[in-house]
Amino acid sequence: MRQAADQEDAIEKRPVTPGAIVPAREQLGDLLLELNRPQEALPEFDRALTMTPKRLGALKGKARASGTTSVAR
């Protein structure tokens, strides 16, 4: 999963091209949360948010990984 996220990060997407439905970096964060590894998930959500700022799924994942329940938009 990490390799897929790295490869997706390296691809430049044109503004008219739709992005991934759920970015691989966000999926990696979700996977790490499922494996009960929130300390590893948190930086993955941070990286996802640098590529797709304010993405709700990544914001929620970051909140779960950091142990908070609120999501700031």
Image (spheres, rainbow, N blue to C red):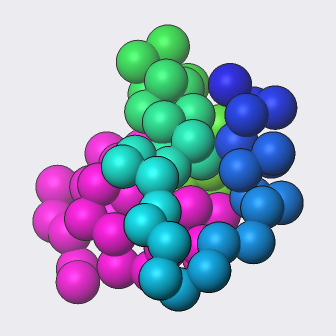
Residue at the (49%, 13%) spot, across then down = 35
State whether the magenta stretch is mostly helix, strand or loop.
helix
Quadrant including the N terminus: top right
Write the start and end of the magenta stretch as one range.
46-73
* Residue 69 as seen in the image, left or right of residue 61: left
* Residue 32 as seen in the image, left or right of residue 62: right
Q: How many marks?
A: 0
Look at the image and say whether residue 48 sits in the magenta stretch.
yes
**Foreground residue among 1 and 41:** 1
Q: Position of residue 55 (x, y in %)?
A: 34, 69
Quadrant including the C terminus: bottom left
Residue at the (80%, 46%) spot, across then down = 6
Q: From the viewer's perspective, is residue 36 above or below residue 62? A: above
**Foreground residue among 64 and 23:** 23
Look at the image and say whether residue 65 sits in the magenta stretch.
yes
Q: Position of residue 57 (x, y in %)?
A: 29, 54
